[in-house]
RNA sequence: GGGGACGUGGCGGAACUGGUAGACGCGCCGGACUUAAAAUCCGUUGAUUUCGGUCGUCCGGGUUCGAUUCCCGGCGUCCCCA
């Protein structure tokens, strides 16, 4: 009997799987009538090292993949690298390493680490998004979108990250700062490439309805992100001479047409064309507009910034009440790219408008009356009323509720030709230009004569030049001596390549399709994609709930419309897993210290910590996501070294529900290791060589064991299907405790035979979680071939059924005893048995039974007084 | 401010559609083995108790024979949006 040695066992089995080629995906034509199953975890950025978050993410995907394989599916479980992006360029700037070398070195290092994890991945399909083959195909479909009008260029105000010197999408601006650099974002005008995601806004909302295996939370977040609202575009006519270009009036957009009679001013965005033209004539306007340009361009920035305005002196007429005139202001809180860049302000019923009105002393005129308020006395102070109510002070709208009033106003404005009902979205077109080197070059050429000319397909891929410099900020492609100088493909004149590269979110918006045939001559092999897509189970962090997952859904739909593939939704099932966290520690100097230099001492129910070196006191801090800055990181390699890969995989899945954060603890991983060890001991205690099978169903203890094994099959199958890995693992532990109660030492032939069958089941059930251990165990009991190729055990319903039930008996809702009855016994019989029970009878003394409730196989409740 | 999720022993967490609250693990405590420690193995472990019980799933109400689960009102934590 030898102690289980993961260091010897784990590499051996990784090699055995590799040599047998068990994870090479079958071509659709070889799969026969096997159903397909595509499991995908969000591919990693090649930072250089894997962390515990990767371990958890890929372990979960591996459980699903191995389980589905065992259940007879033809499984696709690939791996690749999201390899373009800023960190490679940062490394180049900081350390003088070329981004390409840095990235591929990191990939090599991480591939080795991931292979240690024993994942059931088909490595033959691996690619990186920075492979010219991959981004060349990306350039090809980009051009097909360009041809279809889904790509365009426009000058716009953009979020400029002054540190990374690049443009950020609104999604990449968090609290006014760049999501990667953390620098305060500025607004700039720049000509940019955009993808027309807004064309798909409705489709992307409708599509959410069909994604039943997505978390509701993510669907809600996407819906809110798209932010569809119904409203009205209407034109206000100027009182005096209309400014040049505005003869038709000033068009505003509102989602609250019901409050039109409460309007007391108009406000336009600082970058509205009218602001521009006024600024040319008036230095005060120009100065104000310039001031507004400072600060972030995101909605949240504008919302939190102090409201500022400038009266233009212009006045417009109220469209429904010609006797009213409204002043036109420029307001820093009005967004040019939402609606028309102009609003009417109704201070009584909009908080921003109210803040603005109070600051500049504009009228506040309530037109919606909350239920129970008196129209004579109702007024609005510093808080706008935005709730439901009855419209008043509003001419022909008086007495309507706000929804009915919206409809009436839209009808009236449309009939008068003053405007039109319209739907607008919070979602903007996706700005994909990045002024960076380490990204996919946008495959177009700018020609003086011909304009923007797509690169002919036979000249793709446009490959990044290797000889670039990173000694200065800015785009190295722009200052490369020769790369961008080309001749126009159309007229042959001297022309220039586009030097912008694509946002890396483009790279990750179609990789799942490329995996279905990564060597296809076209971007996507339609037959392979038709077979494999959609991804049956996608697994990744919830931080991608809007950005990546929305872009991928959009690109899939856009590619469908170009005929590149046939599915509309890329991911049929989505699971968002929680993070790996750890306690934080601060040393005597207040600095963060690593867990491995701290000793935590338990004293009864409290804990304290000291430095391992010197014993100085350590403050135990909050439990937070593992991060280098807080130093609360545990390196996966160290854990693999100490406890083995299986124990690490098991622990990250056992201690918390997978969608929640898991707290890494030493004790926890030791518990997982103990389980690995005990499982092995149980297998290793069986007699060597084949046990002559004997019938054992007549021996009660043997029968109980095999019954427990069959119940375990059911429980574990359900747990994996429902992504309740922690519950499933608990059932495995429970079963191990049962089988330990019937040790092999000194057992009868019946027990040994039952153990042999139960262990055969156990080996196959633990295989998705601890695959190396399972192989060793399978081998030890003489299983056929490798357990990775063994079918999932089949549940025998008769053995799994429980024929006796222990029913608790309650009297007036309090548990007073229990009775053992045959399963499924009728209510009358159960009642009789319960009332006859000695303990129950004792509690009923002096009471009259009023009612007995029997829930079959569950409980008995006696009502008595 | 709007929307959502959550709140259970010393800790992570179980409890499927209302039906024995605390599965499983960690920790603690006790025991075996050991010269000793580690490792390993075995056992106890919600609180309280006059050993009959009583109390107990954030707090206060409600529905029900029965509520961690459903409803109403608070408090707190977290996430998303503004």
Image (tube, rainbow, N blue to C red):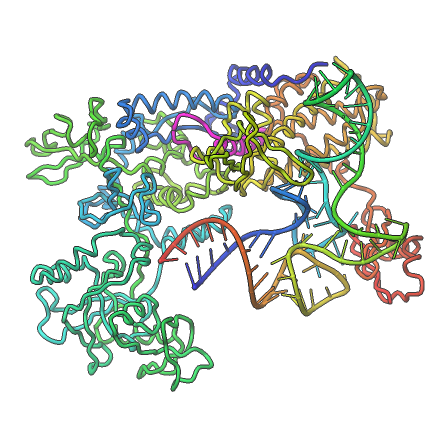
Majority SS type along the magenta span: helix
Residue drawn at x 25%, y 61% is A334
Could you tell me if residue A34 is visible in this image? no
Q: Quadrant of residue A284?
A: bottom left
Which residue is nearer to you in this view: A856 or A297? Answer: A297
Q: Point out residue A88 in the picture as x, y percentages from the top left corner.
A: 31, 28
Above-or-below relation of A783 to A186: above
Please check the rendered image and state whether residue A61 is part of the magenta-colored stretch, yes or no: yes
Quadrant where the C terminus of chain A is found in the figure? bottom right
Number of marks present in the image shown: 0
Above-or-below relation of A526 to A132: below
Q: Quadrant of residue A344?
A: bottom left
Could you tell me if residue A274 is visible in this image? yes
Above-or-below relation of A280 to A364: above
Above-or-below relation of B69 to A487: below
Which residue is nearer to you in this view: A45 or A687? Answer: A45
Please state if A658 lies on the left or on the right of A437 as rendered: right
Please check the rendered image and state whether residue A403 is part of the magenta-colored stretch, yes or no: no
Q: Which residues are magenta?
A: A42-71
- Which residue is most to the bottom? A376
Residue drawn at x 17%, y 60% is A288
Q: Point out residue B47 in the picture as x, y percentages from the top left corner.
A: 75, 49
Which residue is nearer to you in this view: B34 or A300? Answer: B34
Q: Quadrant of residue A101?
A: top left
Q: Point out residue A797 in the picture as x, y percentages from the top left corner.
A: 73, 38
Quadrant where the N terminus of chain A is found in the figure? top right
Q: Point out residue A808 in the picture as x, y percentages from the top left corner.
A: 82, 51
């Amino acid at each position: 009997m030898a102690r289980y040695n993961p260091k010897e066992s784990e590499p051996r089995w990784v090699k055995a799987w590799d040599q047998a080629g068990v994870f090479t995906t079958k071509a659709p034509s070889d799969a026969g009538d096997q159903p397909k199953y595509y499991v995908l975890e969000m591919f990693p950025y090649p930072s250089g090292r894997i962390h515990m978050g990767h371990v958890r993410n890929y372990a979960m995907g591996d459980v699903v993949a191995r389980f589905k394989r065992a259940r007879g599916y033809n499984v696709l479980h690939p791996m690749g690298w999201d390899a373009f992006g800023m960190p490679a360029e940062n490394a180049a700037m900081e350390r003088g390493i070329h981004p390409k070398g840095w990235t591929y070195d990191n990939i090599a290092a991480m591939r080795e680490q991931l292979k240690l994890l024993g994942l059931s991945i088909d490595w033959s399909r691996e690619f990186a998004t920075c492979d010219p083959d991959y981004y060349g195909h990306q350039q090809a479909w980009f051009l097909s979108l360009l041809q279809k009008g889904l790509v365009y260029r426009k000058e716009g105000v953009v979020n400029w990250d002054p540190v990374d010197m690049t443009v950020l999408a609104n999604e990449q601006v968090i609290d006014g700062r760049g999501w990667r650099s953390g620098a305060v974002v500025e607004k700039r005008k720049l000509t940019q490439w955009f993808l027309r995601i807004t064309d798909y806004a409705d489709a992307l909302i409708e599509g959410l309805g069909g994604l039943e295996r997505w978390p509701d939370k993510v669907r809600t977040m996407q819906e809110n992100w798209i932010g569809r609202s119904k409203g009205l575009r209407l034109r206000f006519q100027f009182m005096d001479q209309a400014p040049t270009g505005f003869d038709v009036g000033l068009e505003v957009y509102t989602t609250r047409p019901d409050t039109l009679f409460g309007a007391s001013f108009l406000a336009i965005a600082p970058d509205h064309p009218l602001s521009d033209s006024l600024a040319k004539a008036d230095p005060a306007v120009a100065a104000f507009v310039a001031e507004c340009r400072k600060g972030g361009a995101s909605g949240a920035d504008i919302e939190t910034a102090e409201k500022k305005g400038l009266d233009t002196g212009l006045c417009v007429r109220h469209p429904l009440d010609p006797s009213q005139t409204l002043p036109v202001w420029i307001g820093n809180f009005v967004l040019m790219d939402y609606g028309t860049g102009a609003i009417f302000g109704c201070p009584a019923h909009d908080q921003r408008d109210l803040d603005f009105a109070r600051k500049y002393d504009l009228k506040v005129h309530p037109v919606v009356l909350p239920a129970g308020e008196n129209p004579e006395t109702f007024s609005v102070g510093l808080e706008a009323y935005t709730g439901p109510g009855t419209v008043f002070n509003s001419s022909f709208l008086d007495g309507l509720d706000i929804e009915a009033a919206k409809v009436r106003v839209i009808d009236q404005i449309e009939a008068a030709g003053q405007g039109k009902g319209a739907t607008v979205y919070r979602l903007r077109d996706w700005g994909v230009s990045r002024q960076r080197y380490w990204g996919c070059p946008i495959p177009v050429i700018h020609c003086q004569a011909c304009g923007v000319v797509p690169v002919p397909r036979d000249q793709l891929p446009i490959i990044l030049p290797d000889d670039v410099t990173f000694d200065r900020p800015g785009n190295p492609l722009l200052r490369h001596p020769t790369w961008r100088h080309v001749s126009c493909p159309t007229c042959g004149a001297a022309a220039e390549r586009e030097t912008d590269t694509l946002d890396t979110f483009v790279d990750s918006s179609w990789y799942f399709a490329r995996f279905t045939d990564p060597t296809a001559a076209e971007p996507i092999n339609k037959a392979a994609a038709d077979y494999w897509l959609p991804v049956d189970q996608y697994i990744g962090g919830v931080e991608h709930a809007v950005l990546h997952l929305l872009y991928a859904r959009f690109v899939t739909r856009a590619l469908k419309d170009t005929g590149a593939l046939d599915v509309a939704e890329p991911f049929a099932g989505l699971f968002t897993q929680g993070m790996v966290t750890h306690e934080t520690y601060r040393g005597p100097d207040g600095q963060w210290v690593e867990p491995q230099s701290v000793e935590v001492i338990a004293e009864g129910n409290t804990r304290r910590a000291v430095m391992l070196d010197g014993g100085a006191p350590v403050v135990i801090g909050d439990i937070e996501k593992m991060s280098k800055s807080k130093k609360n990181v545990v390196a996966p390699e160290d854990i693999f070294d100490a406890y083995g890969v299986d124990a690490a995989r098991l622990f990250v899945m056992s201690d918390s529900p997978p969608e929640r954060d898991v707290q890494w603890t030493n004790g926890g991983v030791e518990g997982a290791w103990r389980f690995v060890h005990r499982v092995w001991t149980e297998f290793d205690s069986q007699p060597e060589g084949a046990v002559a099978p004997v019938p054992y169903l007549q021996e009660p203890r043997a029968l109980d064991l095999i019954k427990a094994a069959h119940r375990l099959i059911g429980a574990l199958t359900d747990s994996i299907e429902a992504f309740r890995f922690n519950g499933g693992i608990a059932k495995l532990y429970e079963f191990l405790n049962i089988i330990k109660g019937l040790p092999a030492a000194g057992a009868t032939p019946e027990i040994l035979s039952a153990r042999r069958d139960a262990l055969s089941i156990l080996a196959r059930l633990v295989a998705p979680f601890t695959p190396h251990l399972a192989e060793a165990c399978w081998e030890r009991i003489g299983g056929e071939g490798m357990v990775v190729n063994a079918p999932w055990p089949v549940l025998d319903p008769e053995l799994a059924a429980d024929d006796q039930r222990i029913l608790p008996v309650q009297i007036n809702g309090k548990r007073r005893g229990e009775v053992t009855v045959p399963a499924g016994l009728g209510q009358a019989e159960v009642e009789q048995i319960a009332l006859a029970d000695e303990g129950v009878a004792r509690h009923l003394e002096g009471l009259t039974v009023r009612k007995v409730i029997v829930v079959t196989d569950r409980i008995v409740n006696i009502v008595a007084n």
